[in-house]
Structure formats: C-alpha cells, structure tokens
Image (tube, rainbow, N blue to C red):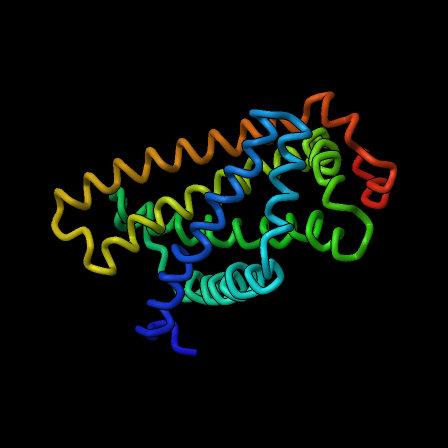
Amino acid sequence: MNGNSYLARKIHSLLGVIPLGLFLIEHMITNFSAYEGGPEAFKDSVTFLNELPLVFFLELFGIWLPLLFHGVYGLYVAYQSNLNTGRFQYGRNWAFTLQRISGVITFIFIVWHLWQTRVQVALGNVSHEELGGLMHDVANNAFFFVMYIIGVIAATFHFSNGMWAFLVSWGITIGPRAQRISSYIWMGVFVICAVMFLMSLAAFRGDEFKDAASAALAWANLV
C-alpha cells in the first residue's frame, strides 16, 4: 500500500465524512438522550436503532467496514507522516499533528468501547436494555471515566478538524478567507459535540442509571 496513494486517501477522506461522520453525530444524539430523558429515553433510542430494517447490513456497510478501512489506513498514514511541529510551529501544522495523534487515540478508544458494549451484546453477556446500566458502571469507574473523556475529546476533534481538511482537499473551501471561516465553524462544532458527549457521560453517572444496572454486568468487574 502506498501511503501517498491518491485514490486510497480520497476514499479514506470520504469515509471519514460519509458514513462515519454521520455515525458520530447519530451516536452523539443517541447518548444525549440519556441526559435529556434519563434511562427510559436512552433505552428507547437504542431500541429504535436496533429495530431499523436490515440493521445488520446497515451497520456492516455503513459502520464496521468503513471504520475498519478508515482506521487501519489512518494508522498507516499516521505512521508515514512527518510530524515537524518543532520546526514549523504554526497553527495548521499543529492541527495536522493533532489530527494524526487524535486519530490513533480515537481508533483505540472505539475498539475498546465496542468491546465493552457491542461485543458483549453479541456474546450475550449484556442485553440492549442493559446498556444504560453498563454505561453507568463505566462512567463511575474513575479510570474508565478519564479514558472516556480523553477518547471523546479525541474523537470529536478528529471529526471536526477532519471536516475542515475534507472541505479543503475536495476543493470546496478555496482561498484563505473561506478556509479561515471554515476553521471557526468546525471549531464551534468540535466544542458543541464534545460538550454534548461529556454531558451524556456525566448523565450516565446518575443514580437513575444505577437502578437500570444488571447483575449480568459483573463480568467486567466494573462495579
């Protein structure tokens, strides 16, 4: 695989927006229902998603395969990148460096999060109805809570800064003024998305989610 392959980079860039960017927004809204409506609203949101027609194929082709390509190829690109912030300490160079670092953190975080949630559902250790209780236990574990904060900030930055880069590389924002305005917009998106995810994470720590927890969650020693 050539790290400078034009086609591979274009596919990698496009998948980061469609469908993975849309998936991040959907995931943010689903989790935020925990903050807005508590356990019942979160359970209803999860149930709605899992009752979509052909949900297995939607997830396979809309999430898992794009995530696998974007993540693995992204790790390769990060490995091939020349991070030279020590020589050129201007804003976009730092953004380029943070994009690579946040991408690695995000990929590791997503794999870990999937192991704690979706994989356990697939193995029958946790039901969809118990995910709120599982997230309560995760959020109340000090180590996991800090790691989730880092993962959420990395993921939302990677998405927002990646959107800025996508608009530039696809010739949508042309010229310094358009790119400067775009950077302000996507920095705002980063702040909004990060705050909504963190508010959701804080909501999962609430006692109302403790009542939704199940003894089945003891498999992970989270309590």
Q: Residue furthest bottom?
A: 1
- Image location of residue 191, percent across then percent down: 40, 32
Numbered label tally: 0
**In-image side of 17 versus 146 (left or right):** left
Does residue 201 lie above or below 54 as drawn? above
- Image location of residue 57, percent across then percent down: 58, 65
Residue placed at 72% from the left, 27% from the top? 209
The one nearer the camera, 128 or 206, is 128
Residue placed at 44% from the left, 50% from the top? 22
- Image location of residue 207, percent across then percent down: 73, 21
Q: Residue furthest top?
A: 207
| Rendered-image quadrant of the N terminus | bottom left
Does residue 135 lie above or below 111 as drawn? above
**In-image side of 147 versus 221 (left or right):** left
Residue placed at 40% from the left, 65% from the top? 12
Does residue 221 lie above or below 139 as drawn? below
- Image location of residue 217, percent across then percent down: 82, 41
**In-image side of 12 versus 199 (left or right):** left
Residue placed at 38% from the left, 68% from the top? 11
| Rendered-image quadrant of the C terminus | top right
**In-image side of 37 versus 11 (left or right):** right
Q: Quadrant of residue 132?
A: top right
The one nearer the camera, 14 or 146, is 14
